[in-house]
Image (cartoon, rainbow, N blue to C red):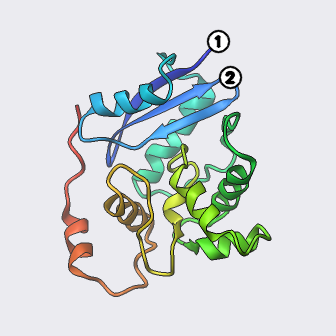
Amino acid sequence: MAGLGYTTFDTAVGRCGIAWSEAGIARVQLPEARELETRRRLLQQYPEAREWRPPADVQTAIDGIVAALNGKAVDLSDITLDTYDIPEFNCRVYEAIRRIPRGETRTYADIAIHLYVSGAINAVSNAVARNPFAIIVPCHRALVTIGQTSGFAGNAGIVTKSRLLSIEGALSGRATNLFDALLSVAPPRPQG
């Protein structure tokens, strides 16, 4: 295979997309309102990508993402990422975030301190906002401050982040509010 491939796949939160190269996973796209929009977002980033049947390593990543979005504990840390065009600092942030255990969160300040750049909270925030590897690099586990689920660049922002944290059980330690009650009964996003 030469060049970039992509495909879409069903999950508990809607139809996601994934793009890959020979170097690894290039992007994971969380679902948009319709599958066509999910494809469009992938192709905006990678207009040269072609829809292909995923090779075994990509299928393993897809299976892991599907399981994670179904609430299963899976380890996605060994999935190879294509970081060719990604700044070195962002790669360091993503590696730190990949080590945050399922069901736990860290603040941007915690991540900056872990990287020995304690004054780089804004740089960590910018890296999180540009994460092209949703779920594989679980940026939903990175918070502005403890208990504050803002600062997520996903297509539905705080709703997406809260839903992902809820799936992992990371919100169980805080008081329930009306938003949480509505989130628990919200239907998955429509597909196709």
Residues at discs 2 and 1 in contact (Cβ within 8 Å) = yes
| Residue in front for this viewpoint, 35 or 124 | 124
Residue 53 position (above or below residue 75): above
Q: Secondary structure at mark 2?
A: loop
Q: Report the disc number at residue 2.
A: 1
Of labels 2 and 1, earlier in sequence is 1
Could you say where residue 65 lies in the image, as x and y percent from the top left?
49, 45
Number of labels in the image equals: 2
Tell me the residue at 55%/72% (across/down).
Answer: 105
Looking at the rendered structure, the kind of residue marked 1 is Ala
Tell me the residue at 33%/48% (across/down).
Answer: 12
Could you say where residue 112 lies in the image, as x and y percent from the top left?
69, 70
Few, some or many residues within 10 Å of mark 2 (<14, 14–19, 20+)? some
Q: Quadrant of residue 121?
A: bottom right
Q: Specify the quadrant that holds the N terminus.
A: top right
Q: Quadrant of residue 102?
A: bottom right
According to the picture, the residue beneath numbered tag 2 turns out to be 22
Few, some or many residues within 10 Å of mark 1 (<14, 14–19, 20+)? few
Could you say where residue 99 lies in the image, as x and y percent from the top left?
68, 62
| Residue in front for this viewpoint, 177 or 122 | 122
Looking at the rendered structure, the kind of residue marked 2 is Glu
Extreme-top residue of the structure: 2
| Residue in front for this viewpoint, 182 or 32 | 32
Q: Specify the quadrant that holds the C terminus.
A: top left
Q: Secondary structure at mark 1?
A: loop
